[in-house]
Image (cartoon, grey):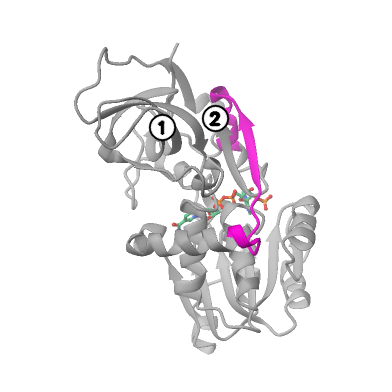
Amino acid sequence: MNKQILLKSRPVGMVGKEHFETVDALLPKRLNEGELLLKARFISVDPYMRGRMNDVKSYVAPFEVGKPIVGGVVAEVVESNHIDFLPGDMVLGNLTWTELQVVNGALVKKLQKDLAPLSCYLGILGMPGLTAYFGLLHIGEPKAGETVVVSGAAGAVGSVVGQIAKIKGCRVVGIAGSDDKNAYLKNDLHFDEVINYRTTKDMSAAIATACPDGVDIYYDNVGGDISDAVLQHINKYARIIICGQISMYNSTQASVGIRPQVALIKNSAFMKGFVVSDFAEYFPEGIKQLAVWLSSGQLKHQETVMKGFDALPDAFIGLFRGDNIGKLLVEI
Ligand code: NAP
């Protein structure tokens, strides 16, 4: 069987295994010119994919019911009918959740095998790393001595944001959902302060204690009550980077919190949303710098790797339970 996972139905509320279906995908008998037969090696699960399960207009089209889930995949070329690829090459693409698939070579990028472990191209040297890099540096413009608060701090994006902020000489406060995650942020990544939002009763008081000089940059990965609390402590000319709102991705009703406009006015502060593809023309610069920091040891990366194709639905659901430290992916 050549397993492929489809969207079986659209979740209303929390996504569950019942929203996925595994089928046997047919393969063509031979490759047309320009085509590759690819074997999936690592498949990424990312929070934005939850948004694609809803039938709503967004920056990327919704998944179709009865059609395969699509996302970031590192795959091995098994057969090639494309001049630029040989069997054994490794490629990155936005591919279907399928064990073996045929795609046109124009749709994938050949990977440099010796630069870093292959899984890094889905994490620190891939979309999440670039999101951290461009969101923080191009929107936040951190300066040495400033206080940077990051939510979702132990995840793929947040853990890189905090480390880049440290490289830039900032004081970094991370907000995450377990003591283990916070111990990792403090002891391994050298964050200055950490807050466990699940056990802290008064988030606003905790932010005040962790940020005695106020908040200059807030890198928001989660939204909701956590962000409402941070916004009460912003400084003059603060920059609020709206990267993600994962606390709301499974909500069935609009979440209403503190309206930020008055705090933005009083502090001449700046709040900006973005998608990483806004910076696509600068990706080579971002990958190069992230790779330099990674090889010099200034950036560390952690992965939570689940094994086997069948683990994909549960791995994806795990993002919303907080199962991961660092990048969550599945090794096939
Ligand atoms: P991730 O942080 O590696 O994984 C998700 C984490 O979110 C979980 O481990 C969990 O950690 C936390 N979480 C889940 N439910 C939560 C809730 N209700 N409240 C607070 N925290 C919750 O994921 P990622 O790939 O790095 O993405 C982080 C955020 O960035 C997401 O919102 C994502 O959509 C966004 N993003 C945006 C872009 C862009 O272009 N704008 C690109 C990539 C990612 P805890 O244990 O700490 O709860």
Disc 2/disc 1 C-alpha distance (Å): 10 Å
Crowding at mark 2 (Cα within 10 Å: few <14, some 14-19, many 20+): many
Amino acid type, label 2: Leu
Q: Quadrant of residue 161?
A: bottom right
Give the residues drawn in magenta, as a range. Answer: 294-317
Q: Which residue is mark 1?
A: 69
Image quadrant containing the N terminus: top left
Query: Which quadrant is the C terminus positioned in?
Result: top right
Query: 165 or 56, which lies in front?
Result: 165
* 276 w.r.t. 305: above or below: below
Q: Quick check: can you spot residue 121?
A: yes
Asked whether 84 or 18 is in front, the reply is: 84
The answer to whether 274 is drawn above or below residue 315 in the figure is below
Mark 2 vs ligand 1: CB under 8 Å?
no
Secondary structure category for the residue under label 2: helix
- 235 in the magenta segment: no
Q: Where does label 2 land, which residue? A: 312
- The image quadrant of residue 304 is top right
Q: Position of residue 184 (x, y in %)?
A: 76, 55
Q: Magenta stretch containing residue 298, yes or no?
A: yes
Amino acid at pointer 1:
Ile
Asked whether the residues under the numbered discs 2 and 1 touch, taking CB atoms below 8 Å apart as contact, a structural biologist would say yes
Q: Residue, x 60% and y 76% (percent of image)?
A: 168
